[in-house]
Amino acid sequence: MTTTMTTATTGTTTMKGTTTSRADLRADPRPPLRRLSTLTVRTRIVVAVAVLTLLALVLAGAAAYLVEFRRIEGDVRDQVAQEMREFETLQGEGIDPQTGEPFATADRLLDLFLSRNQPDDNERLLVVNTNGSRAYVGRSAGAPFGDPAFEQALGDLEESGGSQVIETVDGDSQLVAVRPVSDPSGSGAFVVTWNLTDERATLRSLILTYAAVAAISWLAITLVAWLTAGRLLRPVRDLSDATRAIADSADLSQRIGVEGRDDLSELSRTFNAMLERLEQAFASQRDLLDDAGHELRTPLTVLRGHLELVDVADPAEVSATRALLLDEIDRMSLLVEDLLVLAKARRPDFVVPAPVVVADLIDDLVEKSRALGPRRWVRADAPEPSVVASIDPQRVTQAILQLAENAVRHTSDGDEIAIGAAIDGPQLTLWVRDSGRGVAPQDRERLFDRFQRGAAEAGDGFGLGLAIATAIARAHDGYLALDPDDPDRPGATFRLVLPSRPVTRGEP
């Protein structure tokens, strides 16, 4: 005997000595779609494919079964109707072969028709004579005589005729059609029965075969969907693994292998491009911090040392120290400004291309460069005024002025510095040529790095001019190059090459 006790105050149910919280007995309160959203994408895809496939197979099987079921019943009714028409024809127009006259009795008509016809496999032809005797012919063993359902249908249709579907004690569905016939001595009936259950046996066998094949097909489709979904979602898993690994190790150098050209492959390429930009951004920040920490340490030490040693009681010393410190602060401001330019160089909005007339740009560069020093500034080769290039005029001007300032430091008063440009198809090249002492062979490779100065270089520069010009060139998808030494031409020539830029002829 099981005792159940419910306690309202505690909200628990005790059964067979076990106490269970009501919360444990309640179903998951979340809606089915919400619960499904907690599954993996692969599982949801496979579940969707499996459910849709199963629904399609079941609906196809049910539709085929219903159509075939009705077709079989319609064919049976047509066959039964054909038997009735043949009997009616014999009854109305037939001649008794023994007498050569129309049939004299109903029994003679029934017996002759029964003897002349051979029923189909699941069909039986039966007659009920006027004296109450019964006979049948059919390929199936036995007759339904005595079956309660058959006797009931025969009694209902014996006078009016018609058809009924009955269920026999054997569990078979049978179609019973009755055609009454009478003569002066009494009334009889012609009866046709058709076993619908046996007729439908082939359909049942076919449906069972279909169900087995459909089940195997469903399993195969589900398996293929599982494998295909896993393969298609592999870039997503790689993306998740890479993201997790980056979050754990902070290593932005990792990349996802990309295969194919579908949407998920494009997602992997986009993610790799994002990682590359993030890596560049972090590298730029790291370089900025390293450079700032390295280069600002010395001027800050100088500032601190002079402030500690200055004699505040001596106005002359205070004035000299003030001038010195202001000069050092100006140098620090220039350094910070250059470092900020280098830090921004990897941002996508660092350059803003616009149509620029190249000849006008060269004229502006020559005029602006005259303020850098007393040199013989020359406007060298330049394209015709109709040539327009898509570049960032502010950044290109900044780069060329850096090169011009670098040329001033390596030349003397009155030396020639030439600025020019050339067009080669879609490629624009701007160059600065000086007549100074040139670049030492040992400095040619390292000269473009940050805080690198030539061995013979003098002045107060930080070694960031060429680095800034290089960054501007790279932001334009170009590069900065130094021409090889030419024994016939002293000095150095730096070229700012901006390839893959649309160069047209016309007004900007």
Image (cartoon, rainbow, N blue to C red):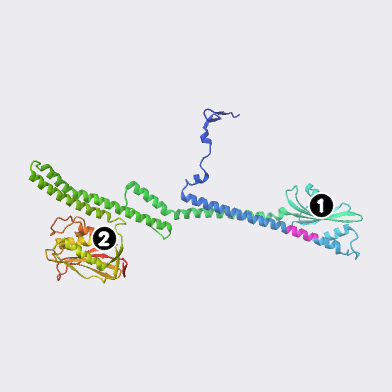
Q: In the image, residue 126 lies at what x, y percent?
A: 81, 55
Q: Nearer the viewer, residue 44 or 280?
A: 280
Q: Is residue 458 magenta?
A: no
What residue is disc 2 on? 394
x 51%, y 46%: residue: 33
x 75%, y 60%: residue: 78
Please state the extent of the stretch shown in magenta in the rendering. Answer: 75-84
Q: In the image, residue 38 lies at what x, y percent?
A: 47, 45
**Spatial CA span between label 2 and label 1:** 107 Å
Q: Nearer the viewer, residue 116 or 334?
A: 334
Does residue 461 lie above or below 37 as drawn?
A: below
Badge nearest the viewer, 2 or 1? 2
Q: Quadrant of the C terminus?
A: bottom left
Q: Is residue 458 left or right of residue 70?
A: left
Magenta segment main secondary structure? helix
Q: Amino acid at mark 1?
A: Leu
Q: In the image, residue 218 lies at what x, y percent?
A: 55, 53
What residue is disc 1 on? 157
Q: Quadrant of residue 384?
A: bottom left
Q: Is residue 234 left or right of residue 193?
A: left
Does residue 435 lie above or below 159 as drawn?
A: below
Q: In the image, residue 245 lies at what x, y percent?
A: 35, 48
Dot 2 falls on a residue whose secondary structure is helix
